[in-house]
């Protein structure tokens, strides 16, 4: 694959012909760095507006009578069913969580299905039932949808695209640009279980203890922070690229640095052990039921008290602090007192995990 080299910003004042990058192609599992470059250099430039430049999970838009949050996501996980979830419930939870990360209460979803010719109706029925059950549990309605059928061998069963709409019940500005030096970084629970669970199911790996995905809605604890009157500067669910990539994205968007404390990151024994066996860094494994909350240091204890009332975030803990340090960087202070720079995921990530 050719290397994507970004031009100077001024070069984007004129249209860039596709021939400028004749050898650049995309492949399954392309790392987070290429994805970031595509968003920044291609999509944000092509669609450029203030909402996109905030680099958040969704957008807060003005509508008659107030504001709404909107988001969209696509799900191509393989296998379709995995310990702890399936593509249907994942599609609902992922979209609901993105709306909640904006500080909005999720209300409505749409669902688009790309179905491969020959897909067993029993499989589609299982996915639809799971999706409906997840929506009801999250308090949202799936109000519109679409189906398309693609040729046999071209769709890997079923892909799902969902869009979501949420409403703001409070006047809040929650996005990376609101992060301040001195803020504490709170993680809602142990990271990495979803990525490892999907990989284990796909490759038929067996660990001593079963690994189940953490996929779940995190809307209730996230919104509870706001209901409690806690000042929340940023929320971000920890998905593709894992904890490390999520923190790097926030730091870069905020123009600030973050120091993470390795001893404070609550890795589960099965994720730690499985990662060691497979040669993976657990900080880059995806979660689908974990999120970051960045709050002022004086509010951290109250925030932790709220989060720990919910089963999905009962193990919440502070894992780092925001600081000013020239160029935005993320550092990890290790158990032995040394530090290492945490980079955005580069190279190949685990493909088809969400």
Image (cartoon, rainbow, N blue to C red):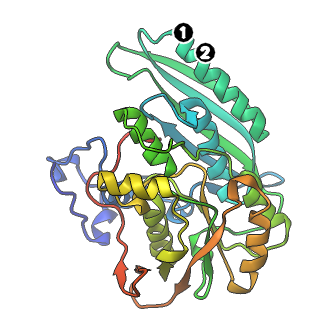
Furthest toward the front, the residue is 208
Label 2 and label 1: CA atoms lie apart by 6 Å
Which residue is pictured at 49% across the width and 69% down the height? Answer: 247
- Name the foreground residue: 297 vs 339: 339
Which residue is pictured at 61% across the width and 29% down the height? Answer: 111
Residue 170, image quadrant: bottom right
Residue 68 shows in the view? no
User: Measured from the top left, where is residue 84 in percent x and y?
Assistant: 58, 37
Look at the picture and state if 131 lies above or below 23: above
Furthest toward the bottom, the residue is 325
Would residue 228 be found to the left or right of residue 338 on screen? right
Which residue is pictured at 67% across the width and 22% down the height? Answer: 129
Residue that mark 2 sits on: 125
Would residue 63 be found to the left or right of residue 255 on screen? right
Q: Secondary structure at mark 1?
A: helix
Which residue is pictured at 35% across the width and 70% down the height? Answer: 343
Residue 207, image quadrant: top left
Does the CB distance between marks 2 and 1 fall below 8 Å?
yes
User: Measured from the top left, where is residue 35 in percent x and y?
Assistant: 35, 54
Mark 1 is surrounded, within 10 Å at the Cα level, by few (under 14), some (14 to 19) or many (20 or more) other residues, namely few
Would residue 135 be found to the left or right of residue 155 on screen? right
Q: Secondary structure at mark 2?
A: helix
- Name the foreground residue: 269 vs 35: 269
Residue 21 shows in the view? yes
User: Measured from the top left, where is residue 10 in percent x and y?
Assistant: 30, 71
Residue that mark 1 sits on: 121
């Amino acid at each position: 694959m050719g290397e994507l080299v970004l031009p100077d910003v001024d070069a984007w004042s004129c249209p860039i012909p596709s021939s400028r990058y004749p050898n650049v192609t995309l492949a399954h599992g392309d790392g987070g760095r290429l994805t970031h470059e595509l968003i920044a250099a291609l999509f944000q430039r092509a669609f450029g507006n203030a909402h996109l430049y905030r680099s958040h999970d969704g957008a807060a838009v003005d509508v008659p009578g107030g504001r709404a949050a909107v988001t969209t996501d696509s799900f191509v996980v393989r296998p379709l069913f995995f310990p702890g979830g399936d593509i249907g419930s994942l599609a609902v939870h992922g979209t609901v969580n993105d709306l909640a990360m904006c500080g909005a209460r999720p209300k409505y979803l749409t669902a688009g299905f790309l179905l491969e010719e020959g897909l067993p109706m029993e499989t589609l029925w299982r996915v639809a039932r799971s999706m409906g059950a997840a929506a009801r549990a999250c308090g949202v309605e799936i109000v519109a949808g679409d189906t398309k059928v693609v040729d046999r061998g071209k769709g890997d069963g079923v892909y799902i695209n969902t869009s979501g709409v949420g409403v703001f019940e409070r006047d809040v500005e929650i996005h990376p640009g609101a992060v301040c030096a001195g803020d504490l970084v709170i993680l809602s629970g142990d990271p990495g279980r979803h990525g490892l669970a999907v990989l284990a199911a796909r490759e038929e790996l067996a660990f001593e203890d079963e690994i189940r995905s953490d996929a779940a809605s995190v809307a209730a604890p996230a919104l509870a922070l706001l209901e409690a009157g806690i000042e929340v500067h940023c929320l971000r669910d920890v998905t593709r690229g894992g904890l490390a990539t999520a923190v790097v994205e926030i730091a870069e968007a905020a123009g600030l640095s973050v120091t993470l404390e390795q001893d404070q990151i609550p890795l589960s024994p099965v994720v730690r052990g499985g990662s060691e066996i497979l040669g993976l860094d657990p900080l880059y494994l995806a979660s689908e039921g974990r999120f970051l909350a960045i709050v002022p240091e004086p509010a951290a204890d109250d925030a932790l008290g709220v989060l720990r009332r919910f089963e999905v975030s009962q193990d919440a803990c502070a894992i780092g602090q925001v600081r000013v340090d020239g160029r935005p960087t993320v550092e990890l202070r290790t158990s032995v007192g040394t530090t290492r720079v945490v980079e955005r995921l580069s190279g190949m990530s685990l493909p088809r995990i969400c």
